[in-house]
Amino acid sequence: MSDILYISELNPNEKNGGAAIEKRNLLYLSKNFDVDNAEAYTLGRGKLKKILDLFTSKVPTLYNRKEVKNIKNKILNSDAKVLFIETTKMGYYNKIAKKKGMKVVTFVHNNEAYLYKTTRGKLYVPFIKKQEKLAIKNSDYLIFLNERDILDFKDYYGNLSKYSILPISLDDEVNDSVLTGLKNHKKNNVGIFFGSNFPPNYNGIKWFKENVADSINAKIYVYGRGFDNCTELNSDNVIVKGEVDDVAKMMVDADFVVSPIFEGSGMKVKTCHALMYGKVFFATKESLEGYELSNGAIIQCNTKEEFISNINKFIDSDSSCFNEIARNDYLSKYSNQSFEEKITKIVNELIN
């Protein structure tokens, strides 16, 4: 008998923030438990299909009926004790698993109804709310990334079942050679913005280009999946590069990182990456949501004036491009050792 049947919305091998969290979750679940096939089930995301199925299916979800049926059968035929599901947008699956007698753990990546309402399209909100209500009702345990999402869920849906906070964490990618490069890097007046092309990221770097870029003494390179063809973002001081294979080189070559994000939910994986590499980090309050950081770990900027002033001050100073405080915060709070202990305890309680 398997311990866990694992279902995710995305493929953990994709290069975006949500997939990075899923990859971590699956890695440590598979390390400590017998996970059914140890693979993710990537759900369909075609826009036209979504709309058609929302209005024609007896099971109004964001995914096409064939995929819904396949995963439903996977749950019904599974001998796993626990369903671990990486989205609140498929409460239908939670309901099937609970009816079958399985325990259900739901990892809450975002308040999806709020996220769609503000960034992805209000059309979907009623359907997402229905699924999120089912997810909450049919979960034995909810895992959140931060306190704000818990408060948002309570505001949207009322009382919650048993839950806890497991913030973003990542495996340390910084070996001795990379660390040496980071510490020895000399300023070349280059900053970076990185992240996949979805509305909060796109809107953030577009705002930065229009309000900040022309007034700073540095060029900003934009890296991330889906940005390759966003030539409209190019300017004298903003250069779109698109998807990158060598993250370490990208980080070592940059003087600093910017994160002008003003909307969204959950936590920002790019923030954890910036801390891991000890980068000088200019970030909005939204980019820092859910993080508990030491004084000096980051430079918070929420207006164009703050971004311009702080970036230029750094460029013109003798300050190092490596931030030891940020690196130490990552090691003590956002590496994967503490996460493994917590998630193992949660699942063990449900299995036993």
Image (spheres, grey):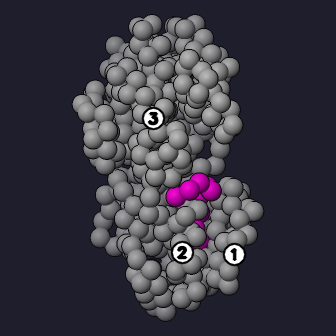
Kindly identify the amino acid type of the residue bearing the numbered disc 2.
Answer: Phe
Residue 19: x and y, percent?
57, 43
* Part of the protein shown in magenta: 191-200
Q: Please give the name of the residue rendered at 64% of the width and 21% of the height, measured from the top-left corner.
A: 65
Q: Is residue 44 above or below residue 281?
A: above
Q: Please give the name of the residue rendered at 52% of the width and 81% of the height, measured from the top-left corner.
A: 212
Kindly identify the amino acid type of the residue bearing the numbered disc 1.
Answer: Asn
Q: For the residues carrying marks 1 and 3, which lies nearer the camera in this image?
A: 3
Residue denoted by label 1: 234
Which disc, if any, is residue 208? 2
Q: Between 2 and 202, which is closer to the camera in this rendering?
A: 202
- Evaluate whether residue 276 shows in this view: no
Crowdedness near tag 2: few (<14), some (14–19) or many (≥20) residues, C-alpha within 10 Å: many
Horizontal side of residue 326 vs 237, given as left or right: left
Crowdedness near tag 1: few (<14), some (14–19) or many (≥20) residues, C-alpha within 10 Å: some
Q: Between 226 and 81, which is closer to the camera in this rendering?
A: 226
Kind of element beneath mark 2: helix
Q: How far apart are labels 1 and 2 at the CA level?
A: 11 Å
Horizontal side of residue 73 vs 288, given as left or right: right
In the rendered structure, does residue 168 fall within the stretch colored magenta?
Answer: no
Which disc, if any, is residue 126? 3
